[in-house]
Image (cartoon, rainbow, N blue to C red):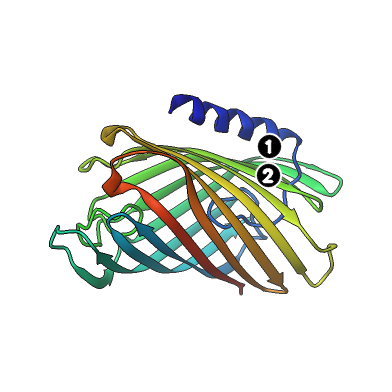
Amino acid sequence: MYKHIIILLLAGILFSQVGRAQGPPITSDKPIMLGGNTVVLKTLTEIRNTEQGTFVNAPLMGHYIISANSLVALHLPYVHYDFNDASGRGSGSTLGDINLLGKYQFYRKDGTGKTFRMVAKTLQTMPTGKSLDIEEMSTGDYSGYYALVGGYESLKFGISSEVGYRWVPDGTLDKFQAKLGFGLPLLKPTYPVNQLNLYFEYSSEWLHERDAYQLLYAQGIQYARKKWTWEMAIQLPLIQDAPVSEQLNYAVFLGTRYIL
């Protein structure tokens, strides 16, 4: 499993230097921020089907861009769960684990029609959800995620990468994570914005306390019109080295963003 993590890390560093980024990714993050004193309202509903059951996370997210290099956000998740095993957890709906996000851009290099940036990122997860052991939805455990995100963006192409670690002091969901995303715009740049993008996104995840590894691939499409963005992605496992009960079958993402 180590070689898959190393490959993603090296690819992220290489392509961050030579690629040309475009637009916000769907299942990963980006270092590019809008102008200061801007509010973005968004949601990204995930429908996750696993060997344990089907789980839906429909969060309401508010992002406040304080300045061109700093951002804070609050994510309020609504979770529906439907277990198909004999665990007795059944089905139902609940408030999931609330997230507090912070990002700070510490490096920026601009060129003609292109820019390369890096941010430090933290995601603090509050134990407000039920103890359902549904990763990134409802665990009932506090966790802190710390990462570096890099990306190079222009009008032609986009690549972003992320490397981070999630610490769960009272659980077994500690995780090393590396993400790599490619964006391809299909329309010529115009103003007001009218853009259709394809996304190709990879996520390498190692839960070392559970001795579980997976490499996921997400194929996405995104349409941006003026202040609105609509997006959809399907995520599938490429490699899974984990107990069968914890394996992912597929996940569907449906999102909307609006800039105030």
Which residue is under mark 2? 159
Q: Is residue 96 left or right of residue 44?
A: left
Where is the N terminus found, in terms of image quarters? top left
Q: Is residue 123 left or right of residue 8?
A: left
Q: Position of residue 149 (x, y in %)?
A: 57, 42
Q: Position of residue 126 (x, y in %)?
A: 29, 56
Which residue is under mark 1? 16
Where is the C terminus found, in terms of image quarters? bottom right
Q: Is residue 236 above or below residue 84?
A: above
Badge 1 amino acid: Ser
**Label 1 secondary element:** helix
Badge 1: how crowded within 10 Å, few (<14), some, or many (20+)?
A: many
Q: Position of residue 113 (x, y in %)?
A: 84, 49
Residue closest to the eye, 214 or 100: 214
Badge 2 amino acid: Ile
Q: Residue at x 49, y 30 (%)?
A: 5
Q: Quadrant of residue 213?
A: top left
Residues tagged 2 and 1 counted as in contact (Cβ below 8 A)? yes
Which of pointers 2 and 1 lies earlier in the amino acid sequence? 1
Badge 2: how crowded within 10 Å, few (<14), some, or many (20+)?
A: many
Q: Is residue 19 left or right of residue 56?
A: right
